[in-house]
Every structure is written in C-alpha cells, then in structure tokens.
Amino acid sequence: MKTLLIATHNAGKKREIGEILRPLGYDVLMFDDLPQPFDEPQETGTTYEENALIKAKAAGDASGLLTIADDSGLEVESLPGELGVYSARYAKTEKERNQKLLKSTEGKSNRNAKFVSCIVLYDPATQTHNTFVGEVLGMLATEEKGMNGFGYDPLFIPQGYKQTFAELESKEKNALSHRAKALKKLGEFLK
C-alpha cells in the first residue's frame, strides 16, 4: 500500500476518503496520525482551490508525503455568499452551524443548495499539484435528520432523494457525494 496524507484533523473526512481510496491501494493518514504534531495553516484563500492548496502544500512540505487537501462548502441559493468557502466558519461547532442555517432559512421557499468539494493533490517531491472538483445538487431540510455523516449532512437532501446525507448509509452517500465525485476524478488520475 502507498501512503497518502490527508491534510485534516477531521476523522469524518479521513474515514470517508479512506473508504474511497483504500481499494486503489492507498493507506490514508491524517495530521493526528503523524509522529509530530501539525497545526493546520490558516485558510486565507477566497476560493476552494486556494484554501485546499494552502493546506496541501503546508502538510506535504512538512511531512514529505504525497498529500491531498479538501476544501468543501455548502452553497445555499437563498443565502448568497454566506457559506461557500466560509461554511466551516459559519458558527463555532457543527451543531451551532446547523442551527444557525436552519434559523437563517426559516420560512424561505427557495431551499436549493449544493455541496462543492475541491481536492488538491500535492507532490512535495516535484512541488506540483492537481485539482479535482465535485458537486452535488440538492435542497435543505427544515430540520436535522440522521446520525451518519458530519457537518451539514443532517440538513442536506441530495437531488433525487428524500433522505438527508446523514440518513443514508455511508456506502450510498460515498457513491454520490460531492467529495466522492472529486475523489473519483482523483482516483482516475492516480491509476
């Protein structure tokens, strides 16, 4: 197995990415698996790609490992510019973010939303990177539903479904999520 570092402390992301990349022969690590502590750099970019590259480059250069970093966000049509690259900073905790989003969209008829994932693969040996983007369209639920997943998953209903991402089994979610779409493109590149 080849080793691939995921530039994150998020165990949910590690699990999801690992489930998708392990069959391709990659053992995935995250920051917390490294022998020396590593703090994530500040995400100062204004796009998903800029933020993912900041994280991938810092982690790859520090560890010497082939590294991927993901910057993802939820974009809500009725709240233009409020989330997107700032989705993780919308409030302090996942629970607070979901509650704030429910309050901000309360009574709104337009509940259209999409998840976007931008994955950057960075090779510290060559100082080069490649970018892979995936999107999934859907809508916001009016209440949190489901115990699987993380982040905004309990509120996001993918197009063609009645359940939220958090209500779907991880195998089903991983087959259609924004991150899965970006990772599929990454997987094709890695082959």
Image (tube, helix red, strand yellow):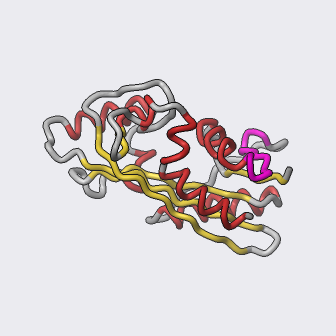
Q: Which residue is drawn at 69% across and 43% down?
A: 18
Q: For residue 23: magenta?
A: yes
Q: Which residue lies furthest to the front in this view?
A: 160
The relative height of residue 146 versus residue 119 in the rendered view (above or below) is above
Residue at 43%, 51% (x, y): give it: 73
Q: Is residue 190 above or below residue 72?
A: below
Residue 182 or residue 91, whichever sits in front: 182
Query: Relative to 143, does residue 36 appear above or below in the rendering?
Result: below
Instruction: Check if residue 47 falls in the magenta segment.
Output: no
Does residue 24 appear to the left or right of 54 in the view shown? right
- Residue 89, percent across and down? 43, 45
Query: From what the image shows, is residue 117 above or below residue 191?
Result: above
Q: Which image quadrant: the C terminus? A: bottom right
Q: What stretch is highlighted in magenta?
A: 22-33
The percent position of residue 109, horizontal first and vertical second, equals 14, 43
Left or right, 27 with reference to 47: right
Q: In this view, does 72 lie to the left or right of 184?
A: left
x 38%, y 31%: residue: 96
Depth check: give the residue in front, 20 or 114: 20
